Amino acid sequence: MRVLHLSHRMAATGIATALAAGALVAGTATTADAAVTGGATYTCTTSLGPADLDVAVSSLAMPTTGIAAGSTIPGGLLPVTVDLTLPATLVGGLAGLLNITAISGTAPDFKMLLGATDVPIDGISAPLTTLPVPAAPMVLSSTGTVHSFVTPAAGTYDISLPDEFTLNPTQQSGIALPALPCTIKDPAAKNIGTATVVKNDSTTAAKPAVTPFHKGKAAKMKVTVNAAHTPSGNVLIKEGTKTLGKGTLSSLGKIVINMGSKLAVGKHNVVVSYKGDGYTNTSKKSLTFKVVR
């Protein structure tokens, strides 16, 4: 069995630039250039019948710990080199049936996955290569880039090969040959590593809508939660063990919480707590306000 080989060559400087631009690695990250390797066998449907090809990732240089949840990773910064090795039987069959002298190939739908999140690869298009005579394995080598994608919520995810992709060969004259759909032979073999996505730290700011509050009138607190990823979820205001008010952040990470009109005259020491969400850690703010007659 010949090998359909995918090698991901990402220079350290390119990784650093991409991570900085995309805020991929959170402050708690311990590594930013871990190599992920592995492979699986794909069955490709050809005019000569099915052909089993191995797909191997020699090095996918992406962080595997401390990835910031909800980060937009810009496309075009992480280069990916893909080597397509066609087996001798397929090369000989194509030459014999179609009288081809050279061939190029594209796999525009090839993608990696981070859990269920697609990580598409752009620009996978190999140059024309002269067919070997007599027939022998032939390598189509191509360099593309990782497309823009958004990292998922916090958790540990499999890094995996796609379930399927299509190789679109073209002969020297530019005429497209029949597409070769390729499907993974054993889905259990597609996972080639794991990556841990972590929550972003947050800060909670709060201030009274008016100072001081007057007894008998609504006491409202303005709350803003800031984080690298716009936070969502609940905010509580407590004085000791008593909850004075609560609510859910808006799409801007803000809320005005009404603590009611029955607060006692005097000073109130409260804690405003943000409870976090799948992308953001909890945070809180302590403050004191007055209620007067």
Image (spheres, rainbow, N blue to C red):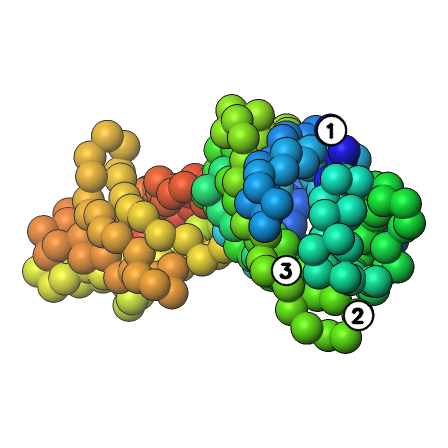
Cα–Cα span, label 1 and label 2: 26 Å
Quadrant of residue 158 within the rendered picture: top right
Q: Name which residue lies at 79% across and 40% down.
A: 88
Give the residue at x 31% y 56%: 249
| Residue located at (18% from left, 53% from top) | 259
The residue tagged 2 is: 172
Where residue 243 appears, as percent x and y from the top left, is 20, 39
In percent of the image, x 72 and y 48: which residue is there?
A: 93
The type of residue carrying mark 1 is Met
The amino acid at mark 2 is Gln
Q: Is residue 98 above or below residue 160?
A: below
Tell me which corner region of the image, top left, top right, bottom left or bottom right, holds residue 276: top left
Between the residue at mark 1 and the residue at mark 3, the CA separation in whole angstroms equals 21 Å
- Please state, as top left, top right, bottom left or bottom right, where the N terminus lies in the image: top right
How packed mark 2 is, by other alpha carbons closer than 10 Å (few <14, some 14-19, many 20 or more), is some
Residue of label 1: 1
Q: Earlier in the sequence, mark 1 or mark 2?
A: 1
Is there any visible trace of residue 185 in the rendered image? yes
Q: Of helix, strand and loop, which one carries label 1?
A: loop
In the image, residue 124 above or below residue 111: below
Q: Please indicate whether residue 263 sits to the left or right of residue 78 in the image.
A: left
The quadrant in which the C terminus is found is bottom left
According to the picture, the residue beneath numbered tag 3 turns out to be 168
Q: Secondary structure at mark 2?
A: loop
What numbered label is drawn on residue 180? none
Q: Specify which label sits upstream in the sequence, 1 or 3.
A: 1
Whether residues under marks 1 and 3 lie with C-beta atoms below 8 angstroms apart, the answer is: no
* Nearer to the camera, 210 or 168: 168
Does residue 71 appear in the picture of this structure?
no
